[in-house]
Image (spheres, helix red, strand yellow):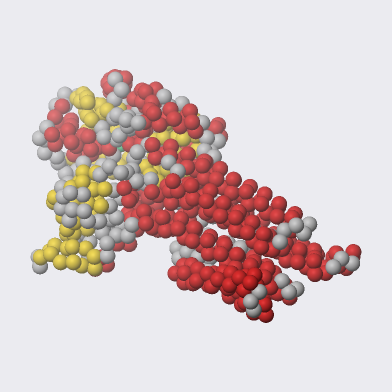
Amino acid sequence: MSSATATPQTHAIGCGHCEDDAPAATGSGMRGWVTALAAALVVFAGALGFFAVYPVWVNGLFVAAALVGSVFPAQRAWQSLRRGSLDINALMVIAVIGAVAIGEFEEAAMVVSLFAAAQWLEAQSLDRARQAIGRLLGSAPVDVLIRDDAGERRVAIEAVTLGALMIVRPGEKLALDGIVQSGRSDVNQAPITGESLPVEKAEGDEVFAGTINGHGAIAVVVTRRRADTTLARIVHLVETAQAQRPPVQQFIDRFAAWYTPAVVILAALVATLPAIVAAQPFDQWLYRALVLLVVACPCALVISTPVSVVSALAGAASHGVLVKGGAHLERLAGVRVVAFDKTGTLTTGTFSLDSVIPLAATLPADLVRLAASVESQSEHPIAAAIVAQALAAGSPLATPEAVRALPGLGVEGVVAGSAIVCGTPRLFEERGWLTPAVAETAAGVAASGLSPVLVARDGVAIGVLGLRDRPKSNAARIVAELRQHEGTHIAMITGDHDTPARAMASELRVDSVKSQQLPQDKVAAIQSLRREFGPVAMVGDGVNDAPALATADVGIAMGVMGSAVALEAADIALMTDDLSKLRYAIRLSRATLANIRVNVALSIVMKVAFLALAIFGVATLWMAVLADTGASALVVANAVRLRRFR
Ligand code: ADP
Ligand code: MG
């Protein structure tokens, strides 16, 4: 396990091979050759001994094999001693010296070459799990075709400036994030989103580094430097995630802190006590003590958690699900409530303006135009629908001044000298503008399942707009599956008006609904859900739900591709806004926890069994090493299955 990327540190315990040290390049490669040499010497010596050709040479060759095989363990044992801890490498070196001292040359050679083989095997499999992430994200190209006044030329990726025009030919991989300036193509975004269907891209669409251009050539204006691309952020997040230790791992570390010294003391007692107290043959008990030392290596236990977590994170990343560490995975597995934001999470977030009701002798076109002018500065999905409607009707929009977003309530600004406010009935009530007539109109709009947006000019309501949002096509199915198969309570927490919220809740068969929630109310809602049902996962669009995401036990942001803020804010980020990835994430988290439990149980049972055998003198040194290698291999094989979990 000597990977170059962020590696979980294992200090207290230490199976040598479970510990990170030298960079991977020299680590695995060199170790492979040294291991092969030690094994070859063992085989050669064995053959010589068998045919009894040069019996005097045999022991010399075994000692040589033991020496060669000890190079890496001795090096690591020394490192661990300097850190003031005793690790398995130290145990192994003591065992080899002891075996040679009592004349068990063959055993010494066997033990150490098997041990070296085990180390090599484990390093290989862990490296491979890590590389899976790198491979899946692919590496973006190193140079870029740039077009400027001087024509087209290839430029090193580092030298590309923001705003440069990047030409991407059909079939090429994109090197940087940007916005399509001209051309049209289908782009395979699977490396980032896990979504196998290509996405249509045309002028104005965002494209991402690491994705693969389809059939058209596109010209792209570069919007992010190499280190800031979505791809770079994902790679960075996954790497830091791997370095994070889940609580299970912390438990194992604490256990390890006293385990290794305890084993050394026990071995010393096994070697000396029988000879002193019961006048037993010293050689025989020394051998048992050595076996005990070797058996005691809790390698499988030490790798049981990290190898599962790394596999799960790699698998998740290939589905476009970024989990920012094993701890979040572990918490997600224990979630009892899934709380959804409504707009953009359960619904598509693409509103249509279905009803326009002017009040106070306002013309419908004026009402829409004034609202749209202020909304043109708003990020809210509702704003886009109002603006689109005004533009479609051919109304020229005025440039608003002093625009201010009122999170969860609406937006206000000044248009041609008049103060225009668009927002919820709650906002109008707070400001004292909600006359009975206005309230009744809004209630009527809400009763028909639309979200009412009230519009005021200089403190007087001039109309009510009704906007419709549709549930995502798989929302009802996912909600049902989560309740039925994952046993979670499903809550909806929304800033929308009560009536349309309830209508949506009953359409999707959500268990409980809280409406007209301001961002801070959503925090309180999560806390009360937690008190009632247990740990809560909050699913939102990441930006305006940030406080709720942070409060929940697990914050899950959806559709974060390209949004740096959302990518940073959540514990788990779903690259696309596909709700089925949410269920996948929960199932994966539970499978991972089960996988870790199996691994821990497996390693402990194997360990205890062989410790007992060693103390009663049944196990030989090489059996002990074989058992440990076997347990480690089983743990690795079990964990690797998580990468293919779907
Ligand atoms: P949700 O919780 O459903 O995602 P928000 O918290 O973003 O909703 O907003 C809550 C409510 O506030 C919306 O349903 C809408 O009525 C109102 N609102 C928010 N922003 C705007 C806006 N820019 N224009 C009009 N209404 C808005
Ligand atoms: Mg929202």
Q: Picture quarter containing residue 480?
A: top left
Can residue 623 be seen at all in this image of the molecule?
Answer: yes
Q: Is residue 227 above or below residue 533?
A: below
**Count of residue discs:** 0
Relative horizontal placement of residue 393, taking residue 345 as reference (left or right): left
Taking the view exactly as shown, the residue that stands out farthest to the right is 278
Q: Is residue 162 left or right of residue 299?
A: left
Quarter of the figure that contains the C terminus:
top left
Percent x, y of residue 305: 56, 52
Which of the four quarters of the rendered structure image does ligand 1 lie in? top left
Which residue is depicted at the point 28% across and 22% down?
445
With 287 as the anchor, is 391 left or right in this view? Answer: left
* Residue 493: percent from left, percent from top: 42, 33
Residue 109, can we see it? no
Residue drawn at x 18%, y 30% is 367
Choose between 550 and 113: the one closer to the eye: 113
Q: Position of residue 66 (x, y in %)?
A: 63, 73
The answer to whether 230 is drawn above or below residue 120 in the figure is above
Q: Which residue shows up at 26% across the image and 32% down it? A: 351
Is residue 314 positioned above or below 333 on the image? below
| 434 or 99, nearer to the observer | 99
